Image: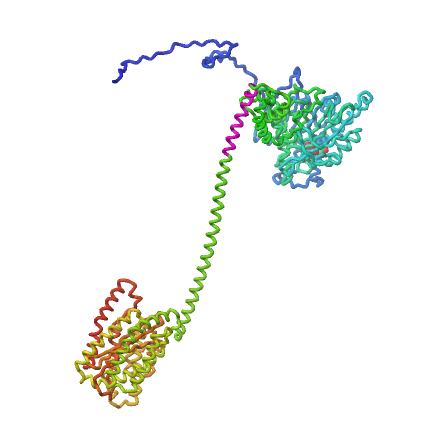
């Protein structure tokens, strides 16, 4: 059912809220929103304070004289300008020991600007506690930088101040406290070449703070020696850069070596008992000579390390390791800009180290100031970032008194460096030392100070595991620190370190209840869980990377194998190519050498195949044809010819059929002679052709034709290409021509006889037939274009006939019987097979000549027409090469045409023979 929807919607508005005054004593409820303090905002009265002049910077708050706590004393000393000019003079005069090239960015090698150094940019105000620094005119115009006033210094020493004046105000109070048992420290801070080392150590004519302090101390000892005999110890070492990568502590006293540091003490640094001031000055001079210095563009003898000198005072009742008071004097290496110094290489690495240490030093003081302004804010542990600050940790954390001396250069050229140092150091004056240790507390050494803090991560892990391990033992470290970190919402690494330190310290002493343990373990259990999660994640990543590494190795192995196989295949290909080249070379050699054509292996195989084919069929046909031939020609062919035919043909055919290496040359010659003999024998047939028309011969002929066709089938002509066939035809033609040539010789001797008539009469047809063949001869052999008619008509021209002849062709003649229906017909079956383009093996099955005629008185007359007709008929066959047959449809047509010719060749040949014989 559909619910009924109200026709009207009533919106209920909440009643108007009235702002309730929040009781000041009670906190607001968490769910109640405080009212917007509009009335309070309207009641605020804006006080129109006078705008300070633009050229002056906002004044830092001066230390309140009424404050009970003691502020950090910051002194300022301005180096004389004259000295700078002298330094410049030395630099230009070649007396500068600086071996580094001058900064190329400085125009004219800095000479023009150096001359401007005569202008001072710092002026000491009348109160003696403030200065006014004015930028150069160039900066005032371009960047609109105005003059700045820095005040609040404990004292400002002008350029004309002496070392004694500085000592009286700077170090004398610290020395007095030192003698009274109060520890203190004096550190010189300032840019490079500003006079820190000069202020601290001075020279023979103007001894610095340290010699003056020694003199003051020993004078005090001399006056109080009888009452309170004390022993003064001295140590001197430097902290320098180790190739720009790490820090190194070197003992500067005689016989000192590189030392290791265990905060805040330096392990192994010599403590030398000072007997008098003269001895101490000698040690100082030795230490300064040993100190790392180098020349830069700003200072010919620039300090490259932080030098620390400690004076320890002890009474005779104390042991060596217990100090009554301690005075530390630190000469920092001056911060420097690369643009000014032009440092390169090692100097640049040193410069980075020096600037880094100076920066950390300033950060520690800033952190201390911020912590003092806001005690809830955790004191940053910047002191861990350098050895110097670690060593001076107590001073930088405000637990011991210290004083700073800022040294600056007054020239306009150094305006940027000077203003930077002043801007950085101005806030330091607000640092207070409210928790200064009493003199008696100086003897107390914290156990944690002996711990090495260079491995905080390792210590933290150890602490976590340690806490988890001691969970059952209900032992925990300092709960106060842990709770402090827990109250702040986060546990800082430093707190963990501290906790670990104090846990070790207190673990053996204090047992706490279980509730506190569980409460204090919360951050550690969470950290432990996070640690385990990260550990599992890292293990998983490591496992995946390991698997990928294994796959990569497998792939590389496969790649190697494939490369090896590829190399093998390439080698094999190269061998095959070389083999092919060798075969080609041999083939070319065979081409050139016609005598050795048949020696080729493939040709031999083909020849052997042909011979093998012929062996079966031709042998039978031969036997049959020979019988027929002997039978038919026994009457008309002379007996000696028959004997010759029998002699030459039979062994050759038999040998050719049986032997693989058939040398067709003898067969060729034998066949030529056989042909000649046959033709000669046929000469006598021309007389009987007209009278011979017996039907027996026709029947016999049909039988013989069947045998010939069978031979033709066995010996197909498809292996004969155009050229080969033409060559074969030429050979056949040559046979006839030889015969003609041969007869020509006979005719020459009998030129007036009757035998000359057939050459001119009936042999005109032979000539015409040969004319048709002759172009093929020239086309295939590129002979000179001599017309066949001419050569043949001039029967006496032996040269031409000889030219037509190609003795290189290998011809193999097979005898077969070609019966003629007229009794004078002659059939020649050409069975040729071409092994290659230049190797022609031709088998001509010479049919037996059947003749009924008994008269062989003029064999010449009929011989020529018969052979010419035979050639003409054969030329008209246009037998194609088998290779061409395989090439396509066009070839198929030819194949069909050949087959057609094969089927039609017999009647046409017979017709031609009959027609010519009748003619
Ligand atoms: N108040 C001065 N009176 C006379 N000569 C001074 C004064 N201040 C510095 N000099 C000279 O200036 C040159 C550079 O001074 P010093 O080597 O003390 O500078 P620095 O601040 O120590 O430089 P760095 O930090 O590179 O070591 C020295 O030859 C020194 O004698």
Relative to 283, does residue 631 appear above or below in the rendering? Answer: below
- Color style of the picture: rainbow
Residue 798 coordinates in the image, percent (x, y): 33, 83
Seen as rendered, the residue at the extreme right is 226
What quarter of the picture does the C terminus occupy? bottom left
| Of residues 133 and 749, the one drawn nearer to the viewer in this rendering | 749
Main SS, magenta region, reads: helix
- Drawn side of residue 691 relative to residue 64, left or right: left
Q: Is residue 831 visible?
A: yes
Query: Regarding ligand 1, which quadrant of the image does it lie in?
Result: top right
Foreground: 758 or 598? 598
Q: Which residues are magenta?
A: 515-537
Q: Is residue 791 visible?
A: no
Q: How many marks?
A: 0
> In the image, is residue 533 part of the stretch drawn in magenta?
yes
Q: Quadrant of residue 53?
A: top right
Task: Estimate the x, y position of residue 902 in percent, counting from the top left.
Answer: 23, 71
């Amino acid at each position: 059912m559909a619910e009924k929807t109200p026709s009207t919607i009533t919106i209920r508005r909440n009643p108007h809220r009235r702002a309730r005054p929040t009781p000041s004593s009670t906190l607001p409820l968490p769910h109640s929103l405080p009212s917007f303090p509009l009335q309070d905002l309207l009641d605020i009265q804006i006080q129109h304070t006078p705008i300070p002049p633009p050229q002056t910077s906002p004044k830092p708050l001066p230390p309140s004289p009424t404050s009970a706590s003691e502020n950090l004393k910051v002194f300022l000393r301005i180096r004389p300008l004259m000295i700078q000019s002298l330094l410049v003079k030395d630099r230009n005069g070649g007396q500068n020991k600086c071996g580094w090239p001058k900064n190329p960015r400085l125009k004219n090698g800095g000479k023009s600007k150096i001359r401007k150094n005569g202008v001072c940019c710092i002026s000491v105000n009348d109160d003696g506690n403030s200065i006014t620094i004015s930028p150069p005119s160039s900066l005032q115009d371009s960047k609109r930088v105005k003059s700045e006033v820095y005040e609040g210094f404990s004292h400002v020493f002008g350029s004309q101040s002496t070392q004694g004046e500085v000592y009286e105000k700077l170090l004398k109070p610290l020395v007095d406290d030192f003698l009274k048992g109060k520890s203190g420290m004096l550190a010189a801070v300032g840019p490079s070449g500003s006079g820190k080392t000069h202020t601290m150590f001075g020279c023979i004519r103007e001894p610095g703070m340290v010699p003056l302090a020694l003199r003051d101390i020993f004078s005090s000892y001399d006056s109080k020696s009888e009452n309170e005999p004390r022993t003064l110890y001295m140590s001197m070492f430097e902290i320098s850069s180790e190739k720009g990568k790490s820090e190194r502590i070197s003992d500067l006293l005689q016989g000192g070596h590189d030392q290791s540091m265990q905060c805040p003490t330096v392990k192994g640094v010599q403590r030398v008992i000072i007997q008098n001031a003269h001895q101490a000055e000698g040690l100082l001079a030795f230490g300064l000579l040993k100190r790392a210095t180098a020349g830069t563009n700003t200072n010919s003898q620039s300090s490259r390390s932080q030098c620390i000198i400690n004076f320890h005072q002890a009474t005779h009742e104390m042991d060596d390791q217990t100090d009554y008071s301690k005075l530390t004097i630190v000469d920092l290496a001056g911060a420097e800009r690369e643009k000014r110094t032009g440092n390169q290489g090692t100097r640049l690495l040193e410069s980075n180290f020096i600037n880094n240490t100076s920066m950390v030093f300033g950060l520690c003081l800033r952190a201390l100031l911020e912590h003092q302004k806001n005690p809830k804010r955790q004191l940053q542990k910047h002191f861990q970032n350098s050895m110097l600050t670690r060593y001076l940790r107590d001073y930088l954390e405000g637990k011991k008194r210290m004083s700073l001396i800022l040294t600056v250069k007054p020239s306009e050229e150094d305006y940027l460096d000077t203003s930077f140092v002043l801007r950085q150091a101005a806030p330091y004056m607000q640092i207070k030392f409210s928790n200064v240790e009493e003199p008696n507390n100086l003897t107390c050494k914290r156990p944690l100070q002996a711990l090495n803090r260079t491995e905080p991560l390792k210590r933290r892990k150890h602490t976590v595991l340690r806490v988890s391990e001691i969970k059952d033992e209900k032992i925990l470290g300092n709960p106060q620190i842990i709770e402090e970190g827990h109250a702040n919402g986060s546990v800082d690494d430093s707190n963990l370190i501290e906790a670990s330190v104090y846990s070790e310290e207190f673990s053996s002493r204090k047992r706490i209840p279980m509730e506190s343990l569980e409460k204090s373990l919360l951050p550690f259990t969470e950290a432990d869980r996070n640690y385990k999660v990260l550990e599992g994640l890292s293990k998983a990543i490591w496992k995946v990377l390991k698997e990928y590494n294994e796959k990569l190795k497998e792939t590389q192995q496969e790649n190697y194998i494939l490369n090896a196989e590829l190399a093998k295949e390439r080698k094999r290909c190269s061998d095959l190519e070389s083999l092919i080249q060798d075969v080609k070379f041999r083939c070319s050699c065979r081409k050139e050498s016609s005598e050795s054509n048949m020696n080729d292996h493939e040709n031999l195989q083909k020849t052997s195949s042909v011979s093998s084919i012929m062996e079966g069929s031709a042998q039978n046909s031969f036997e049959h044809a020979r019988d027929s031939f002997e039978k038919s020609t026994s009457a008309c062919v002379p007996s000696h010819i028959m004997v010759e035919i029998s002699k030459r043909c039979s062994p050759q055919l038999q040998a050719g059929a049986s032997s693989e290496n058939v040398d067709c040359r003898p067969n060729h010659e034998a066949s030529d002679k056989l042909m000649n003999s046959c033709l000669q024998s046929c000469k006598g047939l021309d007389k009987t052709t007209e009278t011979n028309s017996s039907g027996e011969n026709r029947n016999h002929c049909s039988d013989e034709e069947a045998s010939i066709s069978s031979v033709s089938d066995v010996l197909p002509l498809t292996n004969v290409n155009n050229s080969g066939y033409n060559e074969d035809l030429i050979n056949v033609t040559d046979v006839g021509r030889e015969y003609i040539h041969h007869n020509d010789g006979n005719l020459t001797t009998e030129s007036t006889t009757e035998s000359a008539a057939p050459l001119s009469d009936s042999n005109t047809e032979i000539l015409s037939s040969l004319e048709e063949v002759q172009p093929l001869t020239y086309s295939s052999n590129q002979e000179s274009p001599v017309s066949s008619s001419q050569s043949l008509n001039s029967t006496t021209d032996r040269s031409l006939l000889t030219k037509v002849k190609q003795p290189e062709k290998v011809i193999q003649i097979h005898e077969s019987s070609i019966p003629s229906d007229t009794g004078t017909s002659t059939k020649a079956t050409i069975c040729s097979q071409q092994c290659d383009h230049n190797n022609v093996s031709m088998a001509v099955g010479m049919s037996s000549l059947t003749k009924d005629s008994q008269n062989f008185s003029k064999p010449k007359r009929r011989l020529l027409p018969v052979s010419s007709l035979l050639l003409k008929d054969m030329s008209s066959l246009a037998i194609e090469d088998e290779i061409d047959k395989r090439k396509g449809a066009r070839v198929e047509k030819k194949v069909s045409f050949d087959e057609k010719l094969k089927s039609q060749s017999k009647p046409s040949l017979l017709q031609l023979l009959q027609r010519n014989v009748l003619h």
